[in-house]
Image (cartoon, grey):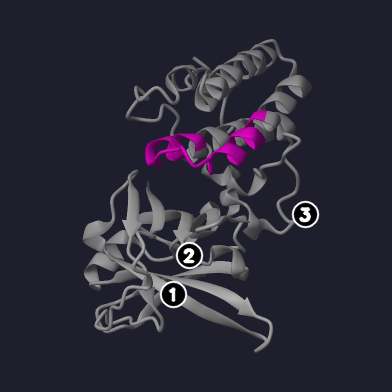
Amino acid sequence: MAMSEKEQLRLSWMTQFNKAQQHDSWGQVVEAQEDYQSMAAQIAAKQGLPTITSKEKDILHRLALCLGARAQALRTMHENITVTDMKCLVPIFEALFTGAEPEIFPVDASKYQFAASMVKPSTEGEIICADAEDESSTDWHQRQAVLRTVRGTVVCFRIEKIGLKDAQEYIDPFMTVLVADARANILDSRDTNFASERRATHVMFNQQVYLNVSLEDMERSGAAIFFEFKHYKPKKKKISTRCWAFMELTELKRDEEIVLEIYHKPTDLKKKKLNLHSEKPLYLHLFATFISN
């Protein structure tokens, strides 16, 4: 049986971390700093993988921050986080993606939380200046932005695909995610990038959207979550909503696929006018993860 991508990552990161620890313990500062930098960048880049669960996302986030913080400590010689702290991460790497990860992260958050701005995922496995590129395009920086503003449980949707009988005909299709309260007041609005692929009966996204309102605030306001499928109409030179879907908070399941029916436009935030967009069994497919903040 082929080794899963998660297992490959776990074994690779264990090897890299052991090497970094050796350099750190032996006082090889430059080598250790480079090792930790490379690992932080790799882990930050992988936390947005489709198969990563809520708990795994949280652990990867903390690991990347610890590695970035230790690299910074070696660079500045201000040891907020020590080589002893790094040794405490060994059981985390050993159990990663196995379902047996420790419930309590072994390093106190005060030692690494400051490192968020120093870590930037890079395909070359490097950490580069946070303002060198457009940060909004990466899952890592979307997550950092929402964690700075939301207090409570952050909801992240991976929008997988939407089923449409004419899926290949749309120009620059994207999704808008809306959160509206019981009075139809919009509490949050987020757009995806353009779809990654158009198939015969599905527009593929595989993109993550972080809501800028906590689950607890949504519950208090009796909110629902809406998903609008939009595309560009060149003749009219405008962006148009083609169809929409919605979900009640009771349908919001952590780490499970969510399948929603699709309705004719216009979007009705009061959920009174619900006309199915197609008689065919075509739906919007989502996957939700939660982040405790």
Q: What stretch is highlighted in magenta?
A: 39-60
Q: Is residue 192 visible?
A: no
Q: Do the residues labelled 1 and 2 touch (CB within 8 Å)?
A: no
- What is the three-letter code of the residue carrying label 2? Lys
Residue at the outermost bottom position: 236
What's the mark number on residue 185? none
Q: Are marks 1 and 3 in contact (CB under 8 Å)?
A: no
Determine which residue is flagged by label 2.
Answer: 165
- Left or right: 96 with respect to 123? left
Q: Earlier in the sequence, mark 2 or mark 3?
A: 3
- Left or right: 273 with respect to 106? left
User: Which x, y percent locates residue 237?
Assistant: 68, 86
What's the mark number on residue 132? 3
- What is the three-letter code of the residue carrying label 1? Cys
Determine which residue is flagged by label 1.
Answer: 243
Q: What element carries label 3?
A: loop
Q: Can residue 98 be seen in this view?
A: yes
State the residue in front, 198 or 205.
Answer: 198
| Residue found at x 32% / y 73% | 276
Q: What element carries label 1?
A: strand
| Residue found at x 40% / y 73% | 244
